[in-house]
């Protein structure tokens, strides 16, 4: 499918349940992405994952991502079973390591929705596409921190995934402009923290225009 034919899609990358719920209620995001670091930052334990899934499913999230873990492919597969058992909207994140690719390939073959995460090279993107992973997640901010032109690299990742079932779901996005620039480069999917998504929705002139509209309606007696 040509990139131009793929509608852009936003996800919220957070375990701050109140802010996630607000974005889901507004139907601004398509789903929720997490990883162990995000869960820890949000004050959530692994034992709370079923509770988080049930809440976000009830609030209408079509896709909810949790990451598997383990030092081997076998361990990752065992831990992925718990995520898959949560329900049809659960997707499994798998790190882009040698063991992770083996686990991801087995999960895809078994019909799971898989995101290969922490993708830092075009070769890794190509490998993820070759096994049929639904998504890859490169980290723009961390690529830039390493002195890499992350925008150009992620655009190349999208190019090598063209014609496959795999698409880029860009992560580590630190500003609204990051999302816009990657979309202009052909990337369709984005996950970002609530603050970044709020910035994407807001502009000072829009707010002042809305205030003027409200004031005018008050004067004309609505």
Image (cartoon, rainbow, N blue to C red):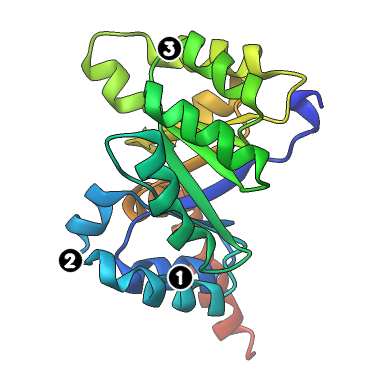
Quarter-wise, where is residue 177 in the image?
top left
Q: Position of residue 85 (x, y in %)?
A: 52, 66
Q: Which residue is mark 1?
A: 53
Q: Are marks 2 and 3 in contact (CB under 8 Å)?
A: no
Q: Tell me how far mark 2 sits from mark 3, CA to CA.
A: 31 Å
Q: Which residue is mark 2?
A: 43
Q: Name above or below for residue 95 compared with residue 140.
A: below
Badge 2: how crowded within 10 Å, few (<14), some, or many (20+)? Answer: few
The tag earlier along the polypeptide, 1 or 2, is: 2
Q: Quadrant of the C terminus?
A: bottom right
Q: Are marks 1 and 2 in contact (CB under 8 Å)?
A: no
Q: Helix, strand, or loop for circle 3?
A: loop
Q: Which residue is mark 3?
A: 121
Residue found 51% across the figure and 76% down from its top:
215
Q: Name above or below for residue 93 compared with residue 91.
A: above
Q: Position of residue 104 (x, y in %)?
A: 52, 35
Q: Tell me how far mark 3 sits from mark 1, CA to CA.
A: 31 Å
């Amino acid at each position: 499918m040509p990139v131009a034919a793929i509608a852009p899609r936003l996800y919220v990358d957070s375990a701050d349940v109140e802010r996630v719920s607000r974005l889901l209620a507004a139907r601004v995001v398509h789903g929720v992405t997490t990883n162990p670091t995000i869960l820890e930052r949000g004050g959530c334990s692994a034992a709370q994952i079923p509770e988080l899934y049930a809440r976000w499913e009830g609030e209408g999230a079509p896709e909810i991502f949790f990451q598997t873990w383990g030092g081997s492919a076998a361990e990752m597969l065992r831990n992925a079973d718990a995520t898959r058992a949560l329900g049809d909207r659960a997707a499994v994140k798998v790190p882009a390591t040698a063991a992770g690719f083996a686990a991801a390939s087995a999960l895809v073959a078994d019909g799971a929705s898989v995101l290969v995460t922490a993708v830092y090279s075009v070769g890794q993107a190509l490998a993820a596409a070759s096994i049929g992973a639904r998504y890859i997640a490169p980290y723009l901010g961390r690529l830039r921190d390493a002195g890499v032109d992350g925008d150009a690299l992620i655009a190349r990742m999208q190019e090598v995934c063209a014609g496959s079932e795999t698409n880029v779901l860009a992560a580590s996005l630190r500003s609204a402009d990051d999302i816009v620039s990657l979309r202009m480069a052909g990337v369709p999917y984005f996950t970002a923290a609530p603050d970044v998504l709020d910035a994407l929705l807001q502009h000072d002139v829009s707010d002042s225009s809305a205030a003027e509209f409200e004031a005018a309606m008050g004067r004309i007696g609505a």
